[in-house]
Amino acid sequence: MTNSNQKPQNFLLPLDMVTVSPALERSVRQRGILVPAIGCGQLIIDGHQRIKAALQAGQSHVPVVDIQGEPGLLFAELNQHRALQPFEIVSVFSKVPDSKKGEFCLACNLSTSPQMLRLLDYLAAEYQNFEPQKFNGIPMNIWREIAHLKNFALIKWFVELEGTVSEKRMTASLLRQSDRKNSLPEVIEAKSAREAIDFLNSLVQPRRTAALTKFQNCISEIDIPSGISFKIDQTFDRPGMDFQLHVTRNSVKRFEQAAEIAEKIFAKVEEL
Amino acid sequence: MLHFNNLYIDETVKNEELVKFISEKISYVNLHFVSGENHPGDGILLTRNRGAFVKPCPGQKGSVCCGYWVVEWGLGCPFGCEYCIIQNYTGAGDITLFVNWEDCKREIIELRQKVKGPIRLGTGQFGDPMALEKIYPLNTQIIDWTRDFEDFTLEIKTKSDYIEPILLAESAKHVTMAFSLNPLWLIDKLEHGAASLEERLLAARKVATQKNCSLAFHFDPIIPLANWQQSYEEVFNLMAAKLKDLRVNWISLGTFRFPKGFQEYVEKYHPDTQILSEEFYPSEDGKIRYFRPFREKIYNFAREKLEKLFPETAIYICMETPHVWERLNQAKFLSADLKKLLDARIK
């Protein structure tokens, strides 16, 4: 291990994708780099944010500790304390030799399944074509869910989909289920994750969707008086309905009305 | 001959005769002496059961259970059924066998002394017992230990057609020989290493006619893939044709279900499997099952067909919720009712 003051030129991560917080930029501008970056030969493998801040502050030379080993594996090892961003994983993955790719995935807490390796290969080639915010906004556990998709156009569609992380997680789960059922189309027209969820639900859960639709149609046909409300188990695992009645001394008849409503629903929705 | 990469022998049993017997009946690459019941993986472990051999069936909380007793002889199975949860608990193909049979014998005798009324005791809860009987002949022993028991049946469940130990037994009237069944194309596709449908039914006929023992059949798991009604009806009709005039104690029905995490396991070992292609939802007991109205449709279909073909046989549903039982029977049906139904078959 050697220490030096270097003019860094080669980086394991693409420096344009690295973001620097204002606090770090201020600190490096005022005090310089306090903790040296780590290099492997001429390649910087850790400390990209500090170096980018230093370059932005006009500093051309930075302290670097040089260590020996496979750069990609060292990078994973040095970053065990934090969750790596998707662009970090895929950009380093593309530089790891094939014989070490499995080891790299395990060091990043990723599966070494053929599906995951196929996805990482695709993303390593394509990630710079995605909008960085959307690409990095997808946590690795969601990437895991969509790793089984062989249709890369759907992966591209999924990354660009508008929606919250939670909606995207749901979408990914439904994509996986739909793929298991061999019901996944080549193209999905939905523009948002919300739309995609509705569409995929009808593919993945046709029995439940049909039963729910039947129930909703039935409800819309019945005139339900105020003071009576009810709910059902949306997965239909528990049959029947939970009724809630508000009864005053003048509306005791609601018991009978509720019973009539229940009879009507049961007659039309046999799933209940 | 069953082959293992590793044979692990617990130090405390290394001088047992049974350990020598099993070691000679299998082939293995490496031999290790270990301590305790924890399986190190990739092989077969011979050890002591430090807990109880005889236990009430570990039915799920919230399910209607039949009051069955099980023998915990170890864990594992040489068959590679894609839907089987046992492989999720062990490594694929790993087997643990308990060799302190003297404790097993004592507990079975104590069970008969302790429990008043009928006892149904089974050995098929933790793996396919007949698939291992050639190297681990525990069923042969239990048949002998229990031959004078009153109000008792030993249910031996298998997907094999190996019935020699029953045929050679002095008496097997107290045995219920049970076969798990599925349509042939599903057996070929999912039950790797198990006997064919025809072989199982032939074995059933042979053992019942030669030894006068009772039969049972388990459609568990029922997997409703394409044309499932037709596929299962063909099996029911084949059973009726092959088993005419034989006593069938019970037939159970159970739809495919699994705990959380099992999907990942199946996809890892069987990436092209179709068994996860239905709609699944979590039940109150934590297990994941088919859409409840669909399960009811399957049970209604199978029960109606089987009741016509086997009017004297108890057709029951395994590990289902009281809700489903109530809807199928149009009346409440609880664990005590199920126990009574099945106990009546062995009197």
Image (cartoon, coloured by chain):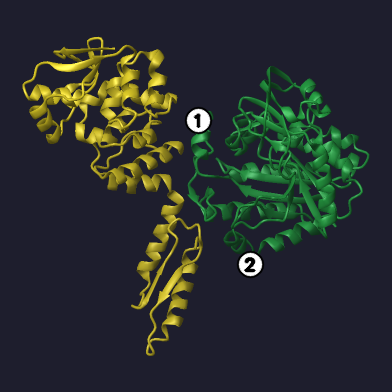
Chain colours: A yellow, B green
The amino acid marked with disc number 2 is Lys
In screen coordinates, is B334 left or right of A183? right
Q: Residue furthest bottom?
A: A250
Residue with the mark numbered 1: B268
Q: Can you give x and y, in whole percent of width and height, for residue A44 in the image? A: 22, 16
Q: Can you give x and y, in whole percent of width and height, for residue A213 in the image? A: 39, 58
Above or below: residue B270 compared with residue B297: above
Query: Is label 1 in a helix, a strand or a loop?
Result: helix
The chain letter for the residue carrying disc 1 is B
| Tag shown at residue A150 | none
Tell me, yes or no, whether dots 2 and 1 are on the same chain.
yes
Above or below: residue A258 compared with residue B194: below
The chain letter for the residue carrying disc 2 is B
Residue sitting at 62 percent across and 66 percent down? B330
Residue with the mark numbered 2: B332
Above or below: residue B298 compared with residue B31: below
In screen coordinates, is A109 left or right of B244? left
Q: Nearer the viewer, residue B162 or A218?
A: B162
Cα distance, mark 2 to mark 1? 41 Å
Q: Is residue B55 visible to us here?
A: yes
Query: Is label 2 in a helix, a strand or a loop?
Result: loop
Q: Nearer the viewer, mark 2 or mark 1?
A: 1
Residue sitting at 10 percent across and 21 percent down? A55
Q: Residue furthest top?
A: A41
In screen coordinates, is A124 left or right of A14? right
Residue sitting at 58 percent across and 55 percent down? B296
| 2 or 1: tag closer to the N-terminus | 1
Residue sitting at 74 percent across and 50 percent down? B69
Q: Can you give x and y, in whole percent of width and height, for residue A107 in the image? A: 39, 25
| Mark 2 neighbour density, 10 Å: few (under 14) some (14–19) many (20 or more) | few
